[in-house]
Image (spheres, rainbow, N blue to C red):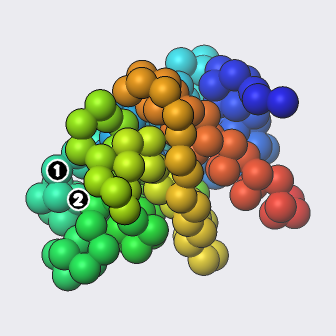
Amino acid sequence: MKQPIEELAVRLGQALKGRGWMASTAESCTGGGVAYAITEVSGSSAWFDRSFITYSNEAKQQMLGVSATTLAQHGAVSGAVVAEMVAGALAHSLAQVAVAISGIAGPDGGTPDKPVGTVWIGWGLTAGQVQTHCHHFAGDRQAVRQQAIAAALLHLCEALDTIST
């Protein structure tokens, strides 16, 4: 059963607020959509610190410290890059938890190895290992972006659910 983005954002906020934690986002293909969903929740300033919209490779390097070598070896749409984006978001914010997204929303930009709808999501805590997952979403650009936003929020919620308070 899929949960609407709004429900996931509220659920995330409750989990973070209960711990006294802050979140940060680092987004590429979603263009700030996760941050938008989070800040639609009243009171989110208590648990959301900031967002980095790093659409270009240069922005990923400058704002988040993503390595040029990682980008060259793996490409922007990769687990290695979103892991570095998460680390950068945590290092450059007051957040204890961060999520990062990089993908190909389409309709152009896909390749045989990374077709349209390929989206890598990474998430992690300041005191923990970064996890990454590759999704393959279907639909047009808007559908891919909406599915990526929901998946990012769900990954964060599930990560927080596994931590005892």
Q: Residues within 10 Å of mark 1 (few under 14, many from 20)?
A: few
Residue, disc 1: 56
Q: Residue furthest right?
A: 164
**In this view of the protein, which residue sits in the foreground, 164 or 142?**
142
- Any part of residue 81 in sight: yes
Horizontally, is 42 left or right of 82 in the view? right
Residue, disc 2: 60
Q: Position of residue 78 (x, y in %)?
A: 39, 65
Determine whether 35 is above or below 115 in the image. above
Work out which quarter of the rendered image holds the C terminus and state it: bottom right
Horizontally, is 157 left or right of 93 in the view? right
Specify the quadrant of the image occupied by residue 108. top left
Q: Position of residue 75 (x, y in %)?
A: 27, 67
For the residues bearing labels 1 and 2, Cβ distance under 8 angstroms: yes
Dot 2: element: helix
| Identity, as a three-letter code, of the amino acid under mark 1 | Ser
Horizontally, is 135 left or right of 79 in the view? right
Q: Position of residue 159 (x, y in %)?
A: 73, 58
| Identity, as a three-letter code, of the amino acid under mark 2 | Lys
Residue at 38% from the left image edge and 27% from the top image edge: 141
Residue at 45% from the left image edge and 68% from the top image edge: 79
**In this view of the protein, which residue sits in the foreground, 132 or 164?**
132
Residue at 82% from the left image edge and 53% from the top image edge: 161
Q: How many marks?
A: 2
Dot 1: element: loop
